[in-house]
Image (cartoon, rainbow, N blue to C red):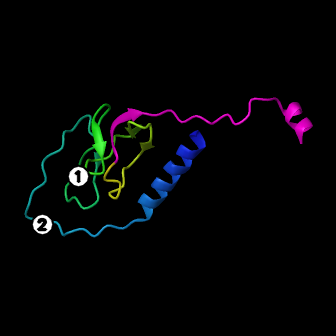
């Protein structure tokens, strides 16, 4: 089950990085709002003209929001986690959370026992 989720996550991230977006032009006469000088991980979303603060711990996240701040991932109710939610994943909605990535234990036997089976 976990291998399936990891594979799906890898495919989603791979597809998201390979897709291109057609964006409109930014109007240089429209000023961007000022950003706070503290506690702001500055990001710029595709197809948005102004930079903004990344989402913080506990904030809602999706393809339509800025990405989560450094060290956080957008995690949905199924436990799927993405650093950036690609635009084509319109159904993906979550909250910004800390995610600990750990190796998956495939088999819990010592080396000698595995050699004997081979």
How many C-alpha atoms fall within 10 Å of the one at disc 2: few (<14), some, or many (≥20)?
Answer: few
* Direction from residue 96 to residue 79 in the image, left or right: right
Q: Nearer the viewer, residue 118 or 14?
A: 118
* Secondary structure of the residue carrying numbered label 1: loop
**Could you say where residue 31 lies in the image, as x and y percent from the top left?**
9, 56
Between disc 2 and disc 1, whose residue precedes?
2
Report the magenta residues as a range. Answer: 92-118
Which of the 4 image quarters holds residue 17? bottom left
Identify the residue position indicated by label 1 in the image: 51
Secondary structure of the residue carrying tag 2 is loop
Q: Which residue is found at the position 70% from the left and 37% from the top?
A: 106
**Viewer can see residue 33:** yes
Q: Nearer the viewer, residue 94 or 18?
A: 94
Do labels 2 and 1 touch, CB within 8 Å?
A: no
Can you tell which quarter of the image residue 102 is in? top right
Picture quadrant where residue 45 is located? bottom left
| Residue depicted at x 41% and y 46% | 83
Q: Is residue 106 magenta?
A: yes
The one of 6 and 24 positioned closer to us in this rendering? 6
The quadrant of the picture occupied by the N terminus is top right
Q: Position of residue 71 (x, y in %)?
A: 42, 37
Residue 55 makes an appearance in the image:
no
Which residue matches tag 2? 27
Q: Which mark is residue 26?
A: none
């Amino acid at each position: 089950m976990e291998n399936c989720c990891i594979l799906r996550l890898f495919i989603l991230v791979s597809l998201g990085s390979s897709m291109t977006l057609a964006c409109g032009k930014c109007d240089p006469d429209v000023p961007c709002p000022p950003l706070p000088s503290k506690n702001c991980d500055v990001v710029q979303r595709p197809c948005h003209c102004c930079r903004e603060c990344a989402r913080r711990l506990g904030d809602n996240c999706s393809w339509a929001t800025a990405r989560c701040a450094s060290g956080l991932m957008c995690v949905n109710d199924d436990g799927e986690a993405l650093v950036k939610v690609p635009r084509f994943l319109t159904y993906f909605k979550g909250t910004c959370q800390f995610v600990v990535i750990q190796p998956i234990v495939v088999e819990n036997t010592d080396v000698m026992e595995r050699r004997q089976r081979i």
